[in-house]
Amino acid sequence: MFTINNVVQPETLKEAYEILVSKKNNTMLGGCAFLKLSNKRIETGVDLSSLDLSYIKEDENFIEIGASTTLREIETSSLLNSYFNGILRESVKNIIGIQLRNIATAGATVFSKYGFSDFNTALLSLDAEVELYKGGRMLFEEFLSKSYEKDILSKIYIKKKGRIAVYTSFRNSSSDYPILNAAVSCLDDNWRIVLGARPQGAKIADKASALLLNKELDEKLIDEAAGIASEELTYGSNMRATEEYRRALSKVLVKRTVKEVLQCR
């Protein structure tokens, strides 16, 4: 259990950022779902509850998700479920239980780049961007490749294209952490294959995705892409599975997910 000396609720992002960086052990507070598992000592916790960042809305070109939006709100949003085959709902619906999904926030999940994240894998398969107070707006893929720096993630943007997307995962039980997860999307024969929980974070299999570009897909080509995805990304071992098992499993998940996208077109 973490120890915290002070909690503040700033009225602006500028104020929140200044408090966050003023001391090394000042920390952002999201839902604190995973922070509770740590023994961290926090001088000042920065709570964004006063900034109205819990929302899901759309405009002509983008869906916008506020950082304080919970995973449960994402799961039950009729707006999100009307786009991309409901991939974001599918990605979060098996995370532990409703009680946890009611407190875990999208902003904390994305900013923390959790290796086991289901949401991040699905999000990376879409045309998503994030907005940081200091770092500004950038592609989610670019954000994931950057080294950690103290900042505040305020919003997530998803471009409203006609992208067809499917998420799948392999778990020991429905509410356990994933052993491996995958998300595949397609827009105008431009494919994006993502694997996560490797146990490292979500990453696009660029070579495998490029192989499918503007092709008429058949069993042989899908097999080849799944094989490339298993080789071009790195995998690791932990208490849930070995590197070799995850690598073999990646072929199955990629093949299965690409086929499911084809059925949805």
Image (spheres, rainbow, N blue to C red):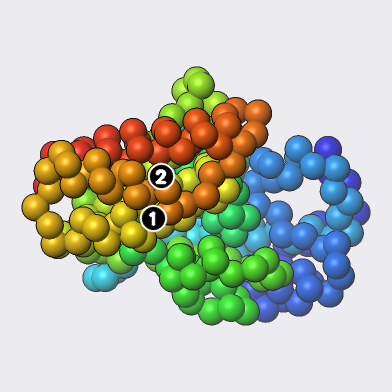
Q: Residue at coordinates 79% horizontally, 73% vertically from top-left?
A: 21
Closer to the camera, 16 or 237?
A: 237
* Closer-to-camera residue (244/3): 244
Q: Secondary structure at mark 1?
A: loop
| Viewer-nearest of discs 2 and 1 | 2
Q: Label 2: how many residues lie within 10 Å, few (<14), some (14-19) or many (20+)?
A: many
Q: Viewed as shown, does residue 241 lie left or right of 191? A: right
* Residue 58 seen from this side: no
Which mark, residue 230? 2
Residue 120 image point, x, y percent: 48, 51
> Quadrant location of the N terminus?
top right
Q: Mark 1 sits on what residue?
A: 205
Q: Is residue 193 left or right of residue 65?
A: left
User: Mark 1 or mark 2, which is nearer the start of the sequence?
Assistant: 1
Position of 199 compared to 218: left or right? right
Residue type beneath disc 1: Ala
Height in image: 199 above or below 66? above
Query: Distance from label 2 to label 1 (Cα)?
Result: 9 Å
Q: Looking at this rendering, what residue extends furthest in the left direction?
A: 216
Count the labels in the image: 2
* Residue 96 position (above or below residue 131): above
Question: Residue, x 57% and y 29% (percent of image)?
Answer: 241
Question: In this rendering, does residue 151 appear at all?
Answer: yes
Please tell me which residue is depicted at 19% across the width and 61% down the height of the picture: 213
Q: Secondary structure at mark 2?
A: helix
Which residue is painted at 46% across and 55% down in the image? Answer: 203
The label on residue 242 is none
Residue 113 image offset from top left, x and y in percent: 59, 55
Q: Amino acid at mark 2?
A: Ser
Q: Position of residue 34 (x, y in %)?
A: 69, 42
Q: Residues within 10 Å of mark 1 (few under 14, many from 20)?
A: many
